[in-house]
Amino acid sequence: MSHQKRIRDYGVKVGKMKTGPNNAITDVKGVTVGHVTLSDGDKQTGVTAILPHQGNTFKEKLIASSHIINGFGKSMGTIQIMELGTLETPIILTNTLSIGTAVDAVFDYMLERNPEIGRTTGTVNPVVCECNDMVLNDIRARFVTKEHILEALHNTSSKVEEGSVGAGRGMLCYSLKGGIGTSSREMELQQGTYTMGVLVLTNFGSLSDLTIGGKCIGEQMEEALREPVTEEDKGSIIIIVGTDLPVSERQLNRIIKRTVTGLSRTGSIITTGSGEVVIGFSTATKIPHDKSVDCITVPIIHEEDIDLAFRAIGEATEEAVLNSLITASKITGRNGNERPTLKDLLKELNIDL
């Protein structure tokens, strides 16, 4: 992360709250992220894996929730998360037509670590989310393999690379190059200091709507460009939220719904053809897979403290989206298709943030 210029390096400060040490989802202790990037001509795609903690997620599940802002998407695993309120696998991000491959790989990953699955206990709920990278990537070729998924899972780190990497390789955002972005916020309560982390896969929006720090940057760019780059918004965004805040599944669902405030501040109007999917988890409580004679105790914050989490998630979401844009690198993909990057256009058009 240290070698990439992020949105704060351009003088843009998002919100009022303090960021975590790395300003990333991995500021939540135990969370790690891994990428596999595939880049060769028409092949511009990849995989991003998020490990919610470093133990066995099937045996030690986390309180989780999902929220669909707009449902034009093909994500897998959200139904059981909403019903049971727990997460029991890592989370995989990739392109739309690689969902099946990713699910199969997560099955392999989990079965290897849990021989009881499908024998003495039930099955497992893999969580895989997608965006459509067909403009820059030959999505029909289905370049992503099970080996790529497993490589991403086996090589996660607390250092998160952003931009045109992993699942974000072929993605577009606000008619520019999009991809992976992350950010975090610290929440100081009487009980201690907690972290709210967000990682996004951005593939949505039209240039004219792009707003940075309250400025209509997209409109300025469109006016300055000789040839407009705006296209119809038919993309998506996946928002992954990790926190160590002690919350119930109901509270977590209330919190992740507020990602829309940060998303909207970047200019999104959440169009009908765009899929906005949010999945959140809390590492504060681990729910054992095996039943015990004792009741499970789940500590939760008081409802009067939740507004701080609402602010934190909005700020982190907004900054993660902007980081995905500003760190993205220009690529030439399928049929020679290209899209400019935010940093290149700012320089070319002499626009200050």
Image (cartoon, rainbow, N blue to C red):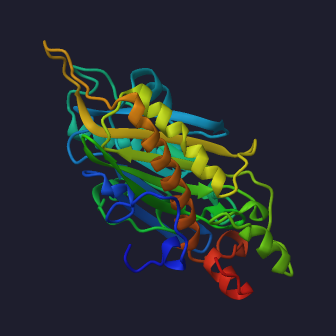
| Location of residue 65 in the rendering, given as x and y in whole percent from the top left corner | 44, 32
Residue for point 33% across, 32% down: 301
Q: Is residue 188 visible?
A: yes
| Location of residue 221 in the rendering, given as x and y in whole percent from the top left corner | 77, 75
Most distant residue in the left direction: 293
Give the total number of marks visible in the rendering: 0
Which quadrant: the C terminus? bottom right
| Location of residue 236 in the rendering, given as x and y in whole percent from the top left corner | 64, 50
Most distant residue in the top direction: 293
Which quadrant: the N terminus? bottom left
| Location of residue 306 in the rendering, given as x and y in whole percent from the top left corner | 42, 36
Q: Nearer the viewer, residue 179 or 345?
A: 345
Residue for point 70% across, 56% down: 267
Q: Is residue 349 above or below residue 318?
A: below
Quick check: 34 left or right of 320? left
Q: Nearer the viewer, residue 175 or 319?
A: 319
Give the quadrant of residue 11. bottom right
Q: Is residue 76 above or below residue 249?
A: below
Q: Is residue 169 visible?
A: no
Q: Is residue 237 above or below residue 256?
A: below
Give the quadrant of residue 191. top left
Quick check: 34 left or right of 323? left
Quick check: 139 left or right of 124? right
Q: Nearer the viewer, residue 316 or 26?
A: 316
Q: Nearer the viewer, residue 335 or 235?
A: 235
Residue for point 34% across, 53% down: 150
